[in-house]
Amino acid sequence: MRTLLLGVTLGAVSTAALSAQPAAAQPAADAGVRHQVYVACESSDEVYRVGFDGREAVVERVIQVGYQPTEVEGPHGLTVSLDGAHWFVSIAHGKPFGLLYKYRVDDDELVAECELGMFPATMQISPVTGLLYCVNFNLHGRMLPSTVSIVDPEAMVEVGRTPTGPMPHGSRLSADGQHHYSCAMMSGHLFEIDASTFEVVRDLQLDVEPPEGHESEAKPTWVQPHPTRREAYCALNAKATVAVVDLDRWVVTRRLSTGKGPYNLEVSPDGRRMVVTYKGDGAIGIWDLETYEELARLPSTRGVTHGVVISPDSRYAFVTAEGKGAEPGALDIVDLERLEKVAAVDVGLQAGGIAYRRAEAP
Amino acid sequence: MIAIFRRQLVFCGSALLCSLGAAQDAPAPDGDAEHQLRVEPPSLTLPVGQKAQLSAEILDIGGRPVEGDVFFFSRARRSVRVGRDGEVMAVKPGTFEVVARSMIAGERGPQATVEIIVPQPEPAKIALDGAPAKLFVGTSVRLVGAVLDKNDVERTDLEVELRSSDPAVAALDPFGHVTGLTPGQVVIRARGGGLSQDHRLEVVPNPVARLTLDTAAEVVRTGDVVRFDARTFDGSGAEVKGVPVLYTFVAQPDDTLGNAATGQIEQDGRFVGEKPGLYTVIATCGAAVARRTVRCTERFPEPQRLVKVGHGPVLDVHTSDLWVWEGVDGRDYCVTGTWGADGEALFWDVTDPSRIERIAAVKVDARTVNDVKVSEDGRLCVLSREGASNRKNGIVLIDVEDPRKPSVLAEFTDELTGGVHNLFIDKGYVYALSAGRRYDVIDVRQPKAPTKVGSFQLFEPGASIHDVWVEDGIAYSSNWRYGLRLVDVGNGIAGGSPSNPVEFGNYAYPSGWNHAAFPFNSPDTGKFYVLAGDEAFPYGLNVRNDPTYPRGWVHFVDFSDLQNPSEVARYEVPEAGTHNLWIEGTTLYVAYYNGGVRVVDISGDLMGDLYRQGREIAWFLPTHPKGVVPNAPMVWGPQPYKGHIFFSDWNSGLWAVKLVEGRRRRRG
C-alpha cells in the first residue's frame, strides 16, 4: 500500500531515497536533492518550472500555454502522469469549454489536448484505474450542478463525465486510487465517486446548517484524503475551518479553526503534516495530524495564497501565492521540519495550481 | 453503490487461450505482468444503433482464472457508447477503441483494447442536384450527385459518376457540367455505391438568335459594381425569356507588367474591376454572343493620407479598447483599458487632439480591463474585469461626470464571475459577456444599484460568444465559429426587449474566426449589411520584444433578406489581421493590428475584395521606439470622432490621426 501511495502522490519520483518515511530519518538538507515543481499562472497563461536545491529556488523555464493569445485563458490545475513522463494542465477558459493539455516532462513540449467541460480546474490521476479526474469548476456564476471529467490520459480522450454539484473543486483521490473526492463549493457538498464505475456513491453536506439552494455558508474548496487513515480533510473557505471527515462513518468528526479563507490543502506523504493555504490571510498553516494542532502560521510572500504540494520526502511544502493586479505571483518553499519559509521566487501573474515534477539527484 | 463488473472465471480452455489475439495488450506499465486480460469478442463489427455485450476474464500466466474487477470505457464515447459492464452501442460509423481495464487486489491489472468497427449504413439512394428537365442547345448547367444512406445522410466516402446516354445530344465534362449540343432526349445516369439513378433530360432548340448587352456606364471606378443586362431575342426579333446567359470578361489592365487577376463577375451580370484598364464583358447564349467594354479608372485619383495629430503614450503596459465621448462640460474625453497589467482604466482629455492629456486613472481589482464604454449622456463609464483576485470579476460602473475625478459607483458580479471580456452600454442597459456563451443585460439606470434584467445565450454545444454591439435596439454578437447573431433587444423587429432578447438572424462562416460585428445600412443601395471582423493568430502573439503577425479580414454579409444572408464581399489586407471596426456614413475604419488603422470607402454596391479594388482610402502605422513591443503597430480599436480618428494601439497607447489630401511625403 505504501508503494501505491507514492505512485499517487509523486508521479515521476523514482529515487528510492525519496520514499516516504518519518522526517526524523531524512538526511539533513536533502543531501543536495533538487526538487522541481510546475506552477500555473492563471492571468499570464504561463506555467513556470521552478527548481529548489534545499537553499534556493530558481525559475528554470517559463512555458506559454493556451491558444487564444489576447484572452486570459487561465491555466489552473496541474498534475504529472504516473510514470512521470508527462504533465497535464487544465486551460480553464475556452470557447466556451476548457481544455486539458498534455506536455512531455523531458522537454516541456505540448503533445496532445482534449476538450473538457466549463472551466476545468484541479485534477489527479488514479494509480489503479490509470484515468485522470478533473473537476469542471464552472466559475461562470450560474449555480448549476457541474461535472467531473474522466480522461484517458494515454489517448487524451474524455471517457466519462460525472455530474456532481455547483462549482466542484479540489479533485483528489484516495490513496488506493479507487475513490475520487471533490467539494461543490456553492452547495457545500463533499462528493465521493467510484473511480471505476464513474458513479457518485456518496455525498455529504459539510455545512453545519444545511443551506437553502446554492447558498452554502461553508463554501468548501478542497478535499484531500489521508494517505493511510480513513480520513479526509475539507477546506471550508468561508468558515475558516478545515472539516475532518471520517470516511467509514461518512460524518464530520472535527472542525479545525484555521486562518481566513482556507483554500487548498495537502497532506504530507508520511501522513504527519497537513499544509493549508489561507487565501484570505495570505498565509500558510502547518498542522500536526496526530494532535490536530496548528504548528505554525507563516505569511506568504504575496497575498492571496493559493496552491500547495509537498515533496515526496515530506520535507518541503511548495506554496503558491497569486498576488493582486500587476504583482507577480510567488512560490514559497516551507521546511516542514523547521517550520519556516526557506526560499521564495517570483513567478507569473496569479500563481495558482502546482504539481511536483520530480526530484533529481545531485 | 453500484458494483462494477466483476468476472469470476469458471472455465478457460486451451483453445480460448489461443484466441487472445488482437484484443491482448501488453499489461499496463503499472499493471501486473503476470496476468492477462481476455475480452470476448476481441473485435466487433456493429451497425449503427445496435448493441452488443463484451465480456472479460483475467487470467494468470498459466491461463487460470483470477478474481478481479474489470471496467470498460470508450475512447470515442460520442461514436461508440459502452457501459462500465461492457455493453456496447454503435452511434456513428468509423473504427473505434473500447478499453477493458482490470484491477487485481486493489492494484492496476492488465488491459485490453477492443476494436469496434461501425460500418457505414448501406447506400439507399442517389440525389442529383441541379438537374433540369429541359436544356437549351448551347447552354450548360452543373449537376452534383451524392449517395445518401437510409437516413438521408450523405456517404461522403462514395463518389457519383455521371454519364450521358448520348453525348452527341448532351455532353458531360468531368466536373458535372452538362451542355446541350443538339435537340433530342438523353438519359443522365448517376452511379455510385452500387446504386444508379436515371434522369431524363430533353435538349431543346435554343430560340435565341441575338443577344444585346447593356450597361448604365462606360467609365466607372475600380470597386464600382456595374450591372450588365443581357437581353435575348429570337429570329423574328421577339424577346425570349428564361434562357440562361453566361457572363464572362476579358481584362486589359493599364498596368501590363504581369498584373494579377483583375475583376469579378457574377452570373446575374454584376461586374467589378480591381485595376484601372479596359474590361470587355461577354455574354453568350448558344451561338449568340454580345460584348461590351467599360473603362475602370483609378478610384482615388487624388490620394488622401492619415497624418498623426496627437499621441497619448502608454508604454509600460498593453492598451486595450477605447471610447471617446463628449463630456457633460462640453469637452472631449477618452477612456482606454489596459491588458495583462494592473487593472487600470486611463482617462484622457482629447479636446485638442494634438495635445492629448492623461487626466486620471481608475484602478480596479483585475489584471485586464479589456473593454470600456461610456453612456450616451457621457456620465457613466463601464469597465469589464478579468483576473480579479477574488475571481468575482464582473463589471465596474464609474461616474465620469467629471472625468478628471472618476469615481467607482458600483460593481456588478452576479453570474459574471468567470470574467467579462466585452460589454456594451445602450440606453441605460449594459450588455456584458459571461461564461463564454452568454451575455447578460443589466439595467444601470440606477447605476449604484445595477440589476440584471435579461440574458441571451447560445445553446448549441460548444457555441461561444466573443463580443456584442448594440445599435437601434439590435444586439449584434460575434460568436467565433457560430458567426453572427442578430437579436432584438428593443428594436421591435422580433418583439424583443432588454429583458426578453429575441434572435431573428444569424450567419456563420467556416474559419471560426468571427470576433467583431458592426451593422451597416448602405444609403446608396438600401442594402443592410453586417460586417464581421476576424481575429486570428496563426503565428502566435508576442507579448514582449517581438512583433506579432495576425491574420483575418472583414466579411461583408448582406442581411437584406434576413432569412437568407449571404457573404458578398471582403476587405483583406495581405499579411495582417483584423481586430475591431467602426463605420461612419459610408466609411469603414478598421483596426488592423499589425496593419495599423485603415480607412475604407464602402459606398455603393459591394462585391469582391475591396482591398484589391483600391477602395482603401488611407492607412497609418503607429509605432513608438519605447512601446511595450518597440516599433510594432498593433492597432486594437478605432473610433472616428468630430473629424479625427482616434484609435488605441496595444503597444503604444492612444492616438489621434486625421485624413488629409495629398500624397505621403517621401524622402530623397
Image (cartoon, rainbow, N blue to C red):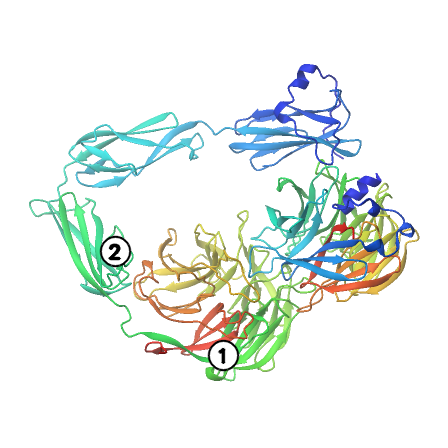
The residue under the point 87% across, 53% down is A273
Along the viewing direction, whichever of A351 and B217 lies nearer the viewer: A351
Q: Quadrant of the N terminus of chain A?
A: top right
Q: Which residue is mark 2?
A: B270
Same chain, marks 1 and 2?
yes
Asked whether, in this view, residue B570 is left or right of residue A348, the answer is left
Chain letter of disc 1? Answer: B
Looking at the image, residue B80 sits to the left or right of residue B496; the answer is right
Q: Answer yes or no: do the residues labelled 1 and 2 have beta carbons within 8 Å? A: no
Q: Classify A85 as above or below A362.
A: above
Q: Secondary structure at mark 2?
A: strand
Find disc 1 in the rendering and name its residue: B311
Mark 1 neighbour class, 10 Å CA radius: few under 14, some 14 to 19, many 20 or more:
many
Please indicate whether residue B639 sits to the left or right of residue B29 in the image.
left
Residue A60, numbered label = none
Res B592 quadrant in image: bottom left
Whichever of labels 1 and 2 marks the residue nearer the N terminus, that label is 2
**Could you tell me residue B575's position as x and y percent?**
42, 60
Name the amino acid, label 1. Answer: His
Residue A286 drawn above or below residue B305? above
Residue sitting at the far left? B236
In which quarter of the view is residue B596 placed? bottom left
The kind of residue tagged 2 is Arg
Secondary element at tag 1: strand
x, y percent for residue B32:
75, 31
Which residue is nearer to you in this view: A35 or B319? A35
Q: Is residue A4 above or below residue A297?
A: above
